[in-house]
Image: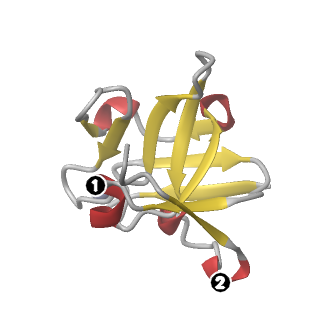
Amino acid sequence: MKYASSCHCGAIAFEVEGEIESLMECNCSICSRKGHVLWFVPKSQVTFQTPESAMSTYTFNKQVIKHNFCSTCGCSPIGFGSDGEGNEMAAINVRCIPDLDLSQYTINHYDGKAL
Ligand SMILES: [Zn+2]
């Protein structure tokens, strides 16, 4: 399955290939503010239609996760990180996939507040 995702103004657009097996909502300081619902995939499953350089990037704390966002419309459809074994991962904010019906999925809650 291929999912098309974009920020609101379209400066960031990409496709994600894969099956959604689980979704996660996290209560850490940034996820709770932004309201992300996340789907983790290897970054190799993401194909950008727009240059990655079009994204602004915010990092904090250990600076290991790249919280990307659009500096024009403010949406944050994708973040980058690593799975702990050095593999590049993408955290897809599925709220930026317009064709996805979130009510069809179970959303797991992750306690990231303590991290
Ligand atoms: Zn935008």
User: Could you tell whether 28 is left or right of 47 in the image?
Assistant: left
The single residue placed furthest to the bottom in the displayed view is: 103
The answer to whether 98 is drawn above or below residue 50 in the figure is below
Three-letter code for the amino acid on which mark 1 is drawn? Ser
Three-letter code for the amino acid on which mark 2 is drawn? Ser
**Which residue, given by chain and number where applicable, does mark 1 sit on?**
29
Circle 1 residues within 10 Å: few <14, some 14–19, many ≥20: few
User: Could you tell whether 45 is left or right of 59 in the image?
Assistant: right
Q: Are marks 1 and 2 in contact (CB under 8 Å)?
A: no
Q: What element carries label 1?
A: helix
Question: Can you tell which quarter of the image residue 43 is in?
Answer: top right
Ligand 1 location (quadrant): bottom left
Question: Can you tell which quarter of the image residue 34 is in?
Answer: bottom left
Provide residue 106's location: percent of width, then percent of height.
69, 73
User: Could you tell whether 104 is left or right of 91 in the image?
Assistant: right
Residue sitting at 30 percent across and 48 percent down? 69
Name the image quarter holding the C terminus.
Answer: top left
Provide residue 1's location: percent of width, then percent of height.
80, 55
Q: Is mark 2 on a helix, strand or loop?
A: helix
**Which residue, given by chain and number where applicable, does mark 2 sit on?**
103
